[in-house]
Image (cartoon, rainbow, N blue to C red):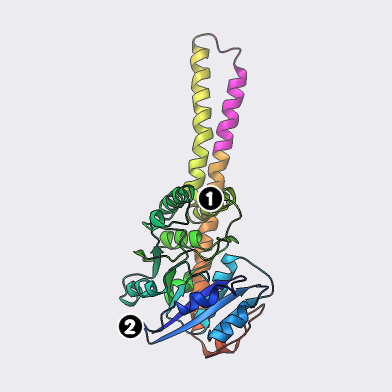
Amino acid sequence: MKLIIQIPCYNEAETLEVALNDLPKHIDGIDKIEYLIINDGSKDNTVEVARNWGVHYIVSFKRNKGLAKGFMAGLNECLKHGADIIVNTDADNQYCGEDIEKLVRPIIDKKADIVIGERPIDQTKHFSPLKKKLQHFGSWVVRKASNSDIPDAPSGFRAYSREAALKMNVVNEYTYTLETIVQAGRGKIAMTSVPIRTNAELRPSRLFSSMFGYIKKSMLTIIRAYMMYKPLMAFTTLSTIPILGGIILGIRYIVRLVNGVGGGNVQSLILCAMLIIIGVQTFVMGMLADVISANRKIMQDVQYKVRKMYYSSDACMDNTFDEAKDEAPLS
C-alpha cells in the first residue's frame, strides 16, 4: 500500500523544511511513503527547499491559483503516481506530523474512505475567541449541509482513500475543505474524524485577509455546495417564504372583503398575487435545478469511471501535468 503526503505551498521556503522534517517515514500497514508539494506560483525558493530535502514530486503553477485548484492538482498527481492513500497537510507545520498515522488508520482498516483531523480548537492559543466561535459555527453549518457529523470542517489535515480521491471534484476557487465534506456527505462516502494535535504557529494564516472576508467566502462556499447537491430542498425552502407571505395577504384580503372593508385593499391583493407567483417560479427553478443536479450526478459517475481507467493505466505515467510540472522523482 502506497501513501503520498501532499503539501500545497505558496512562498513557504521558511517553513516548508520544518513541516517536511515532521512527516513520518514509516507507518505500520503502509509499504511505501512518498512526498509531493504543489508549488502554487511561489516567488521564493520553495521549490529549491523541496528538492534539497528530497521531495519525490513537485507540481508547479506559473501563477497563484489558490488552495482549491492546488488541492485538486495534487490529488490528480498523487493518483497518477499510484497512491492508495493521499494525505493533505499544510506547509506551515500547523498539524503534528506524527498524527498522520491516526488519519490513515481507519482507511487501512477499511472503516472509512475520508478521515478528517479534528483540531483542539478551544485549546489553540493563537485562535482568537471570535475565531473559535466561528470555527464551531461553520462546522455546525457544514454538518447540516452535508448530513455528516464532522466536528472540524475547515481542517485541512485529512486523508483520502484512492476511491474517494477519484470521486472528488472541487468547483469553487476558494478552498476545498468545506465543499468536499458536503460532496462526500451527500454522496454517501464513508467519512469519519480523529482527534489530532496542532503545533505552535510559525506564521499567520494567509487564507483570508479579514474575519469578515473569511465568513463571507465560507458561507458562500457552503451555500453553493448545498445548492449543488440538494437544489430542490434549497429552492423549496426559498419559495416557501413568498408563498406564505402571499397566502397570509390573500386571507387578510378575503377576511376584510367579507367584512365589507376590502374595497380599498386592492394593493394587498396585487402584492399577494406577486408573492405567490415569485414563490411558484422559485419552486419551478428548484425543479429545473434538480434535473440539472441529476445530470451532474451522471456526469460525476462518468468522470469517476474515466479517471479510474486513466489512473490505472500505464499510459498516464507518460503524460505530463498541464500547466506545468516541475518534475518528477528526486529520490
At a point 35% along the width and 64% down the height, the residue shown is 195
Q: In the picture provided, is 77 more to the left or to the right than 149?
A: right
Q: Is residue 247 visible?
A: yes
Crowd tier of the residue under label 1, counting other residues whose Cα lies within 10 Å: few below 14, some 14–19, many 20 or above: some
Crowd tier of the residue under label 2, counting other residues whose Cα lies within 10 Å: few below 14, some 14–19, many 20 or above: few
Label 2 sits on residue: 29
Q: Secondary structure at mark 1?
A: helix
Residue placed furthest toward the top: 260
Q: Secondary structure at mark 2?
A: loop
Residue 16 or residue 109, whichever sits in front: 16
Residue 243 or residue 40, whichever sits in front: 40
Residue 252 or residue 212, whichever sits in front: 212
Question: At which x and y percent is residue 51?
Answer: 58, 85
Quadrant position of the N terminus in the picture? bottom left
Label 1 sits on residue: 219
Q: In the picture provided, is 198 more to the left or to the right than 319?
A: left
Asked if the stretch drawn in magenta spans residue 327, the answer is no
Q: Three-letter amino acid code at disc 2?
A: Gly
Question: At which x and y percent is residue 13?
Answer: 60, 75
Q: Quadrant of residue 72?
A: bottom right
Q: Main secondary structure of the magenta part?
A: helix
At a point 54% along the width and 54% down the height, the residue shown is 221
Bounds of the magenta span? 261-279
Numbered marks: total: 2
Q: Three-letter amino acid code at disc 1?
A: Met
